[in-house]
Image (tube, rainbow, N blue to C red):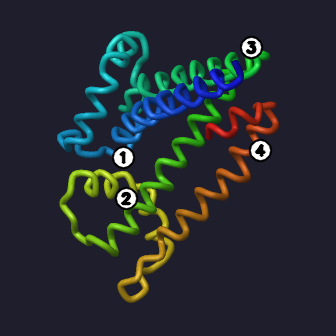
Amino acid sequence: MIGLNTAAIFVLQTLGSLYLLIVLLRFVLQLVRANFYNPLSQFIVKATQPLLKPLRRIIPSVFGLDMSSLVLAIIVQIILMTLTLLLMFGTTGDPLKLPVWAIIGVTALFLNIFFFALIVSVILSWVAPGSHNPAAELVNQICEPALAPFRKIVPNLGGLDISPILAFLVIKLLDMLVINNLAIMSGMPDVLRLLM
């Protein structure tokens, strides 16, 4: 029985986390004003549209941002965490804490999207600079808003852009000092912290 539960948790977390990533990417793409005609953007739109369409009718936009994708990400995270806890312990514990844990989890994933996009962007700048690949274009569009504030602070050192290093540091510090501490203070179980 334990083996079945472990396998079920693995499948649930893999598929659930993948869909959660796609939903949150939809929010990030509109946040950074990415090209929605990009083939990858089109895939993300098509994968999220069935669940977002009904939510749009009840959730208003804020500052021109479609908040339904962010709300859907939190709902998916709550479902994922609930099922994980039920499979592991047979109970969810305090159900009032689930939305708090979900917001913490979605925020951690939001930071991770930028962190890994920066890694891919740095690698591409060395391996395939100026690439017009749809994935490379999307990664650069995600990274630009995150790097812009650091580029204002740090000058370009003879063709060497160190703004990604500063962005990495800030993202990791936010993760370690804010996200992890919020997870601990809210009593998030270790099994859920591993999802982040």
CA gap, disc 3 and disc 2: 44 Å
Q: Identify the image quadrant of the N terminus.
A: top right
Instruction: Please tell me whether mark 2 sits on a helix, a strand or a loop.
Output: helix
Under mark 1, the amino acid is Val
Q: Residue at point 47% right, 63% down?
A: 149
Instruction: Please tell me whether mark 3 sits on a helix, a strand or a loop.
Output: loop
Q: Which residue is mark 3?
A: 90
Q: Nearer the viewer, mark 4 or mark 3?
A: 3
Q: Which residue is mark 4?
A: 181
Under mark 2, the amino acid is Glu
* Residue closer to the observer: 34 or 119: 119
CA gap, disc 2 and disc 1: 8 Å
CA gap, disc 2 and disc 4: 28 Å
* Residue closer to the observer: 9 or 71: 9
Disc 3 crowd, CA 10 A, few/some/many (<14, 14-19, 20+) = few
Query: Which sits earlier in the primary sequence, circle 3 or circle 1?
Result: 1
* Residue closer to the observer: 143 or 184: 184
Query: Which sits earlier in the primary sequence, circle 4 or circle 3?
Result: 3
State yes or no: discs 2 and 1 in contact (Cβ < 8 Å).
Answer: yes
Query: Which sits earlier in the primary sequence, circle 2 or circle 4?
Result: 2
Q: Position of residue 76 (x, y in %)?
A: 51, 22
Instruction: Please tell me whether mark 4 sits on a helix, a strand or a loop.
Output: helix
CA gap, disc 4 and disc 1: 28 Å
Q: Residue at point 35% right, 41% down?
A: 29
